[in-house]
Amino acid sequence: MAMTKRQRVRAVRGVQYAILALVVVIAVFTADFGKIRAAFFDLEVAGKMFPEVITIALVNTLIYTGLGFAFGLVLGVVLALMRLSTVAVYRWIAGAYIEFFRGLPALLVILAVGSGVPLAFGTQLDRYVSIMIALGIVGSAYMAETIRAGIQAVPKGQVEAARSLGMSPTKAMLWIVIPQAFKIILPPLTNELILLTKDSSLVLFLGSSQLQYELTQFGRTELNQSRSLTPVLVAGICYLIITIPLSYLSRYLEKRTGGKKIASPEKVDVDVEATK
């Protein structure tokens, strides 16, 4: 007798649960929990990492990420406006920049800015400046497309209402379009901030003093000294302390902005009058 659709769904789900239970049982009976605890949960090794893992590594990771995101956001706005420009040369330059740096691994960009530029031009950039530029370049190529999409999502009626009140195209873009676009793109920008936080781990290849360590480099140094994987686990937890709240923030902003309609032209009229 043939099964109904609901019975087939239940059967498939039962098989999936059975496979999952089998994998768990095999893992429980074959794992050496003593070795796992010694490798990943050595409290003595973890205790030696504090407070430096917070006061130095975590703080430096936040600083590097913040600098890169701020620079990338400014550069991304410029690139987005160039992509939307009526001047063909600007569109070509912005398009070539975005495709070029989106196609390159972030590590190559960081090495090129942090090590290649000083070798090529005989000048040594400040570490914070080189990290800001490198991460900013990586992030701006992605943020530019997000910002461009947000600008294009703003109804043309908003611009027409602003122009009818005598605002120039530049003022309409700065005071009407871009603020509304940012309300739309806040969730994806938050996701970009998470990606940039993880990309900041690549600055370990530039070399640094102990006071300049970020989480990955700090964890690797402690790993080499202790011969335990506990430092890697602690560094990973510190990354999660940054990224998990940002993930929740992104979902919260998506709920707040996703269900809202863009303000009507009448509302824009009022806002424009207030800016005069």
Image (cartoon, helix red, strand yellow):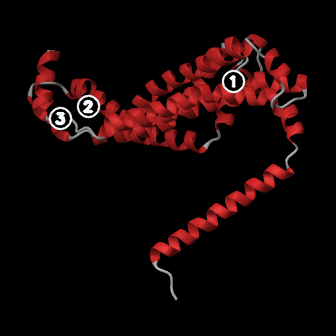
Q: Mark 1 points at which residue?
A: 114
State the CA–CA distance, disc 3 to disc 1. Answer: 43 Å
SS at circle 2: helix
> How far across and how far down the image is residue 172, in percent?
21, 27
Residue contact at pointers 2 and 1, CB within 8 angstroms:
no
Point 62% across, 64% down: residue: 16
Q: Residues within 10 Å of mark 3 (few under 14, many from 20)?
A: many
State the CA–CA distance, disc 2 to disc 1. Answer: 36 Å
Residue contact at pointers 3 and 2, CB within 8 angstroms:
yes
Q: Which amino acid, mark 3?
A: Gln
Q: Which amino acid, mark 2?
A: Val
Q: Mark 3 points at which residue?
A: 158
SS at circle 1: helix
Q: Which amino acid, mark 1?
A: Gly
3 or 1: mark nearer the eye: 3
**Closest to the observer: 258 or 141?**
258
Point 89% across, 38% down: residue: 35
> How far across and how far down the image is residue 114, in percent?
69, 23
State the CA–CA distance, disc 3 to disc 2. Answer: 7 Å
Point 90% across, 28% down: residue: 227
Q: Residue 2 carries which label?
A: none
Mark nearer the N terminus (2 vs 1): 1
Residue 63, quarter of picture: top right
212 shown above or below 75? above
Residue 46, quarter of picture: top right
Examine the rendering and report whether any part of residue 82 can be seen.
no
> How far across and how far down the image is residue 133, in percent?
58, 23
> Is residue 166 shown left or right of residue 181?
left
**Closest to the observer: 184 or 235?**
235
Q: Name the residue under label 2.
A: 177
SS at circle 3: helix
